[in-house]
Amino acid sequence: MQKIISISLLLLLLWGLSSCWKEKQHFVARKGILDLSQEKKIELLRVKGEFFFAWQKILSPKEILQSKDFLPLPIEWNRKNYTPQGYATYSLLIKLPANSKDLGLELPNVATAYRLWFNDSLFTSMGKLATQPDSSVAAYQKNIIKIPNHFLKDNTLQITLQISNFEHFRGGIYYPIYLGSWEEIDKKTKKIRDFELFIMGALLFMAVFHSILYFFLSRRQSNHDSFYLVLICLLVVLRTSLLSVGSQYWRELFPNSSFELMMKTEFFSAYALPLVILLFLDALLPNIINRKIFQAAKYIAWIMLGLAFLPIPTYLYSIPIYYFVIYALYILEIYVCLKAKQKSVKEAYLILVAFLMPMIFSFLETLHHQGVILFAYANITSLGMLLFLFFQSFVISYRIAKAYAKVAYLSKNLEQEVAKRTQELEEQKEELTQSNIILENTKNELERSRESILASIRYAQRVQNAILPSDRYISKFSQDYFIFYQPRDAVSGDFYWFHGDTEGFYVAAADCTGHGVPGAIMATMAYISLDYAFFRKEHQNLGELLQIFDKELVKLLHKNVQPDEEPTQDGLVIALCKVNPKTKELKFASANAPIYIVRGEILIELPFDKHIIGGNSRETKEFTEQTFPLETNDVIYLFSDGYQDQFGGDKKKKLGYRKFKEILLKIAPLPMQEQRKLIEMEFNAWKGNYSQIDDVLVIGIKV
């Protein structure tokens, strides 16, 4: 129903606008001559066509008739490749019907000073015509003229306009000139004046009405939509008083107003509208516009308002920006209204129709000025704003009425509502009580499960720690070493392995796939498999030991895998060394794990095989034992990748191998237990407040 009423009202208004006045006669001037001699009489016509034209010349009526240049009207001369600032002479020779008398002429706002001649006589002027900017005085007013009959006695009328413009961004005559019987001109003017008074009166009434709403109702509820509607009303009234087609009421109220003041006031009233309408839209439909989009649109609207305070000649360049901002705002309004409808705002369609009004009527006004459609009232954008304000007033009034109806209903049915709400609250309380009991039982069950899981993990931790070599055992074979071992969880997927004999000692650092409980299970299986491979004594060197270790672990991992099942890819990387302190010889074999030697200020990275232990059982792997001569005070470092992969620092990046090497070079000269403290401090400082992402193992041994 809202849509039907809105569309019907719009069509009715358009019909009224187009039918309240029509151009009764259609003639076009050719080569400066408008021939009406074959007509019985002149009723009302828009003077258009080619005028005699002389650029940068102030010519008399006789002199201008010798010009070979012509300019079609209405159009500003700067659209014909002339500069906006300058001066020119226009003239039109009109052949009148026989016995013509009592004619009138309607001159629009002309930019920006002129003298009007009838035949060879100067009849009137507006502003001060000049050929230099310093002596020019601009005017901004239309003129309704009754042509004395003695100018018409020869059935010929020459209209000459000497025009200068040094203030406006448009030059010449860009609105239509109307010629007709004085009765028709006067009737048209009075109708338009009445219509303008109606629009301004209606807008002022709305401004007063919404001021009352705001100060007594909306302001208390922190709702500013009525306030913004008042501002819109006042801005439209201000612009209408300046651009009135029938009469410029601003000039009548303030006759001494300067041209500059009137122009800046006109553009201020226009350029302030996007900002106020945007604020009104956000107040009317809160929480619909995305905040980032709203802030960006508001910033652009403030810039648009600032353009109104620039010098007047710059307005020519700001008008395209204004139209872009206005139509972008129209698109935003339509989008917000449609989104509001999706959110079940009942008045969304009515608000959409309201926002469409100024868009439609401003487009129609453009067509009117282009001569495509003729309306009696040229400034019909003001009418569109009136309809916009009418619909928005209806929306606000509807919301207030709905709120008061709800208050009245609640007042009348208060006792029933209180009883109803009390019963609902009691029911909700009972439901909450039952829910709390269920939640408490669930919580207790979860606590028991948690304690059971934690007890199992603590037991697994004791088991894992039990199989790792103790400091007492390691100290029998090496006095100068440290082990930094920090699992991510209670149990770890990293492990270290140690065995000593009469020729020295074996040491290994391993990193299994996974961490936590799965990683710990894998680490335990790997530790047992390595022990088994070592004590079988079937290997001749460390390479063969890793090969046996690999086969034993693969056999263990695939023991119960069915033929149709996918074999596991779990495995580990390991660095295995044999150190002979007497001969200072290092033998090593590595499955995809680096080994670092720090000698003085040099860090040496030992080569390693690219295979892992475990993984794909079908892969053929060979591991090679290599030898490296050691020197006194060399430091051997074995490690997993948990240290280097830790995220931290200011930019939450991985610590990385380069920084890890820098840390090792820095700490290598220090005693081993101090090295361990610094390794831990550097790690925790880098990690900061971030979570540890992997198990960490670093072993250092000084020769």
Image (cartoon, rainbow, N blue to C red):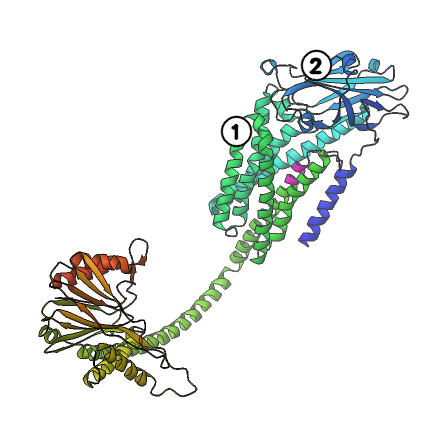
Q: Residue at x 66, y 35 (%)?
A: 199
Q: Main secondary structure of the magenta part?
A: loop
The percent position of residue 331, horizontal first and vertical second, equals: 60, 47
* In-front residue for pair 301/400: 301
Q: Which residues are magenta?
A: 370-385
288 to 49, vertically: above or below: below
Q: Residue at x 28, y 66 (%)?
A: 641
- How many residues crowd around disc 2 within 10 Å: few (fewer than 14), some, or many (20 or more)? many
Residue 324 can be seen, yes or no: yes
Quarter location, residue 48? top right
The residue under label 2 is which amino acid type?
Ile
Q: Secondary structure at mark 2?
A: loop
Give the mark, 2 or 1, whose residue is nearer the N terminus.
Answer: 2
In space, the residues marked 2 and 1 are separated at their CA atoms by: 33 Å
145 to 618, vertically: above or below: above
Which quadrant: the C terminus? bottom left
698 to 686, vertically: above or below: below
Residue 309: mark in rendering: 1
Quarter location, residue 189? top right
558 to 478, vertically: above or below: below
Which quadrant: the N terminus? bottom right
* In-front residue for pair 666/514: 666
> Is 39 left, or right, of 520 in this rendering?
right
> Is 342 left, or right, of 581 in this rendering?
right
Quarter location, residue 557? bottom left
**How many marks on residues?**
2
The percent position of residue 305, horizontal first and vertical second, equals: 53, 34
The percent position of residue 207, horizontal first and vertical second, equals: 58, 37
The residue under label 1 is which amino acid type?
Phe
Residue 525: mark in rendering: none
